[in-house]
Image: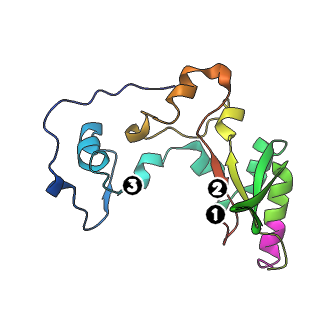
Amino acid sequence: MSTLIEISSGSYLNEDDCVTTMIERIDSTVTYNDFFSKYLMCNKPCVISFQAIKNWPCRHEWVLNGAPNFEMLRKLFGHSIVPVADCNRKFYNSQFKNNMPMKSYLEYWADYKRSCYDKSMPLLYLKDWHCVRSFSNVPMYEVPQYFVSDWLNEYYIAHPELNDDYMFVYMGPKETW
């Protein structure tokens, strides 16, 4: 699951090379070494072109006419229990969270959309769902080469018996976060 990428040794950029005046768009032809030295080491933001994700199954199967394909999501994950935050209810310094079946969350979202985003309804956001962990047999995506060295996840990849990860799914209607 994890790929080791060697970074060629050489001189690193000086501080002047790391100044950001605009955010660049890059595509998958940028090598990992170039990405590492030009963006990662400088903490310089960039936007990775959609070409890097154009073949992801989730982009084609989970979306219909530019919107979430609720029927496909229900078919794949309907019985899964997912964590949902209510953006209108505070719980200390965060939102109140609860668990619900994915099919119920999708029904809520469809109802909310049909109601023209009625402000009297709860504002629910699916947050921190471990979809990849729960559905490792479902093809979803390939991690772009620039992120295959997953610093946060490497410990959990090395210890699968811990059954944890830092790979989450977030989704919700407009005005959720």
Label 3 packing within 10 angstroms: few (<14), some (14-19), many (20+): few
Please give the name of the residue rendered at 70% of the width and 67% of the height, measured from the top-left corner.
173
Residue 139: image location, x then y, percent:
62, 35
Residue 28: image location, x then y, percent:
34, 45
Badge 1 marks a residue whose secondary structure is: loop
Q: How far apart are marks 1 and 3 (CA)?
A: 20 Å
Quadrant containing the C terminus in the rendered view: bottom right
Badge 2 marks a residue whose secondary structure is: strand
What residue does disc 1 label?
65
* Quarter holding residue 44: bottom left
Is residue 89 inside the magenta stretch?
Answer: no
Three-letter code for the amino acid on which mark 2 is drawn: Val
Q: Distance between the residues labelled 1 and 2?
A: 7 Å
Three-letter code for the amino acid on which mark 1 is drawn: Asn
Badge 3 marks a residue whose secondary structure is: loop
Please give the name of the residue rendered at 54% of the width and 44% of the height, measured from the top-left corner.
56
What residue does disc 3 label?
49
Please give the name of the residue rendered at 41% of the width and 50% of the height, measured from the top-left corner.
51
Please give the name of the residue rendered at 50% of the width and 36% of the height, measured from the top-left corner.
152
What residue does disc 2 label?
63
Three-letter code for the amino acid on which mark 3 is drawn: Ser
Is residue 114 inside the magenta stretch?
Answer: yes
Q: Is 147 left or right of 103, judged from the image as shown? A: left
> Which callout, 1 or 3, points to the residue nearer the camera?
3
Tell me the magenta residue range.
110-118
Residue 166: image location, x then y, percent:
58, 39
Label 2 packing within 10 angstroms: few (<14), some (14-19), many (20+): some
Q: Against 136, is 93 above or below?
A: below
Residue 175: image location, x then y, percent:
66, 72
Which mark is first along the chain, 3 or 2? 3
